[in-house]
Amino acid sequence: MATFELYRRSTIGMCLTETLDQMVSGGILTPELAIQVLIQFDKSMTEALESEVKSKVSIKGHLHTYRFCDNVWTFILQNAQLKSEEGQETVDSVKIVACDSKLLTQ
């Protein structure tokens, strides 16, 4: 299965990684089991987003940076306006990471 490690840079992902590292260093987990936990984390986050998130957001802003690497698009927008059914918000900067969800299940 291909994994993009999309969620590991989030706060919860970094905390999980740090905890697993401590458990491996302390001999509680093997490195192989820690890797399997991280892979399952990525898979669970993807499944939860697919099944639980129903909102749509419209984003407008100044495109500062974009790149395409390993089938993953990254966009950085400045002075972005995010509009949803609940309202509108303006932020200084937003980073969007996008990939083909079909590649996650391979």
Image (spheres, rainbow, N blue to C red):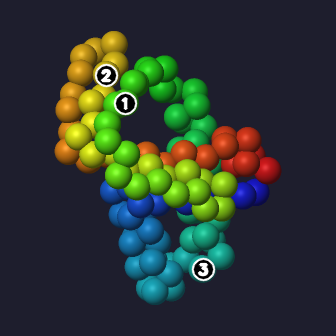
Q: Give the amino acid type for the residue marked by disc 3 in the picture.
A: Thr
Q: What amino acid type should be assigned to the residue bearing mark 2?
A: Lys
Considering the numbered disc 1 on the image, is that residue within a helix, a strand or a loop? strand
Q: Residues within 10 Å of mark 3 (few under 14, many from 20)?
A: some
Q: Position of residue 29 (x, y in %)?
A: 55, 77
Instruction: Please tell me how crowded label 1 is: few (under 14), some (14-19), or many (20+) other residues with Cα within 10 Å.
Output: some
Find the distance from the CA under tag 1 to the CA under tag 3: 43 Å
Residue occupying the point 54% across, 45% down: 98
Q: Amino acid at mark 1?
A: Ile
Residue at the far right: name it.
Answer: 106
Question: Distance between the Cα atoms at labels 2 and 1?
Answer: 6 Å
Decide if residue 42 is in sight here: no
Q: Which residue is mark 2?
A: 83
Residue 30 versus residue 71: which sits nearer the camera? 71
- Residue at 73% from the left image edge and 41% from the top image edge: 102
**Residues under numbered marks 2 and 1 in contact, where contact means CB atoms less than 8 Å apart:** yes
Q: Residue drawn 28% across and 15% down?
A: 86
N-terminal label among 3 and 2: 3
Q: Quadrant of the N terminus?
A: bottom right
Residue 52 left/right relative to 35: left
Foreground residue, 63 or 54?
63
Task: Name the residue beneath numbered marker 1.
Answer: 59
Looking at the image, is mark 1 or mark 3 earlier in the sequence? 3
42 sits left or right of 1 in the view = left
Percent x, y of residue 10:
38, 55
Question: Which numbered marker is on residue 30?
Answer: 3
Residue 11: which quarter of the image?
bottom left
Compared to residue 83, the image places residue 68 above or below, namely below
Nearer the observer: mark 1 or 3; the answer is: 1
